[in-house]
Image (cartoon, helix red, strand yellow):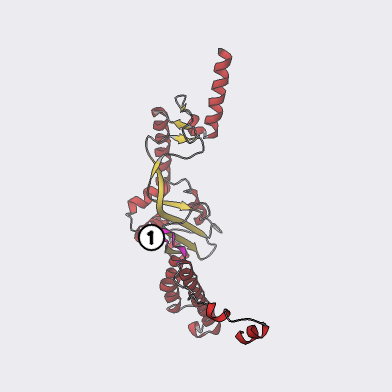
Amino acid sequence: TESKHRRRGGELKTRSTELGSAVTASPLTTVLPASTTGKKSIVLSSETRKELAKQAKVTKEERRAQIDERHKYLISRLADGIGLSEQQVEEAIISDDKFQLIEQFFAPSGLKKLLFFYQDALQQKSNASLRSDGSTNGLLQKKLFITMGSTENFTGTCAFFLRTSDNVITASNVSQEVNFGVFDCTNGNILQGLEFFLSQIMIPALKSQQNWGAVKEGLKNSQIQEFLYSVEKFVGILSSSRRNIEDKIQLTKVDIDIYVSNLQNPSDYITAG
């Protein structure tokens, strides 16, 4: 009997370990039998959930204490661009497991971009069970989160910050060194969102640009004119591609029977050609 208990305990420990130390922290964590889908579920005990919530609260407060004028500048831009309150944005940022990317963005020669998605995401219920494949039972709700842009599907709004140099980002230079923009991809229509962003925001901004750095001629410079032309041409290609995908361009069906029914010999084909 003791041997059986040890084997069963070992199996339970192995399954729990695969789901992370946070799940195995409590001895009250239970593995439920496989459901009709063949997936095993782990129900977190109330003790474990309380401990995880406590740890999360401590982490959030530590991050909140790190927020300075640089963070507040980002929070302000995000709130304006997405339509949330600054309090909502701050809460989302300090709760994000990619919070450290912000510091990497501020660092000298740091990340060139900092991306935020605001879109429907699966929100875990407070009493949700955790399956052995890492998925949970939850509801789709709007969520603001930091992303690298390569792991999550983009279906909503992307707010982005771009660095203009390798200088360290400070409270005094953040407004000069960091550019901000919003890219709307509601319902996953990326081509339409990119087309709108370039044609309605970027191109007008470029054409109104007065300072082109070392190029003193500004918009009269042939290279700048060529650059603007290439951007406008690219927008035209985007528009054409989008219309093709949306089946907005349809080739007219032609009844060719009247042309080929009387073709009898090679000379008839040559004449038809």
Graded by Cα atoms within 10 Å as few (under 14), some (14 to 19) or many (20 or more), the crowding at tag 1 reads: many
66 vs 15, left or right, is left
Quarter of the figure with the C terminus: bottom right
Q: Residue at x 61, y 81 (%)?
A: 263
Q: Residue at x 53, y 65 (%)?
A: 165
Residue 256: in sight, yes or no? no
Q: Amino acid at mark 1?
A: Arg
Q: Position of residue 206 (x, y in %)?
A: 46, 76
Residue 156 figure quarter: bottom left
Q: Which residue is mark 1?
A: 77
**54 lies above or below 196:** above
Q: Position of residue 100 (x, y in %)?
A: 49, 49
**20 lies above or below 184:** above
Return the residue found at the far right.
266
Residue 27: in sight, yes or no? yes
How many numbered marks does the figure carry? 1
150 vs 202, left or right, is right
Q: Is residue 186 magenta?
A: yes
Q: Is residue 239 magenta?
A: no
Q: Position of residue 184 (x, y in %)?
A: 41, 62
Return the residue found at the far top.
1
SS category of the residue bearing label 1: helix
- Extent of the magenta region: 183-191
Please tell me which residue lies in front, 71 or 153: 153
Q: Position of residue 74 (x, y in %)?
A: 41, 57
